[in-house]
Image: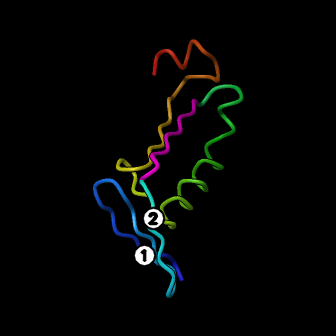
Amino acid sequence: MLPSTTNKKRSKEVKIGFLTWRFKIIKIYFDFGTVGLDGTYEPFQARLDNWLHKVGYTEGFDCLSLKFEGEDHSEAAWQKR
């Protein structure tokens, strides 16, 4: 059974069966490029994004995953973001 969630302004409630957890919203951000080392991340990032959504995270609200075409894993690329 997947958890059900309720988004509130500063907290989130997660229910799995008869158990309920309420916790502060933790925002998660990921980004990756498509060149070099970063070029291998996409399938793994997609799996992680799917799992985050299944456990109640909402894209754009408390999690964000961005792909930067043509960028690599370097400080110069990160500065552009």
| Residue 58 in picture, x, y percent from top left | 39, 57
Q: Which residue is mark 2?
A: 56
Circle 2: residue type: Gly
Residue ID at (35%, 50%): 61
Residue ID at (69%, 38%): 40
SS for callout 2: loop
Quadrant in which the C terminus appears: top left
| Residue 13 in picture, x, y percent from top left | 40, 68
Q: In the picture provided, is 41 more to the left or to the right than 7?
A: right
Determine whether label 1 and label 2 are within 8 Å by CB: yes
Q: Is residue 32 magenta?
A: yes
Q: Residues within 10 Å of mark 1 (few under 14, many from 20)?
A: some
Residue ID at (64%, 26%): 35
Q: Is the residue 66 above or below the residue 15 in the image? A: above
Q: Is the residue 77 above or below the residue 21 in the image? A: above
- Part of the protein shown in magenta: 25-33
Q: CA distance from mark 1 to mark 2?
A: 7 Å
Q: Which residue is mark 1?
A: 4
Tally the numbered discs: 2
Residue ID at (45%, 71%): 14
Q: In the picture provided, is 58 more to the left or to the right than 52?
A: left
Of 28 and 59, the residue lying toward us = 28
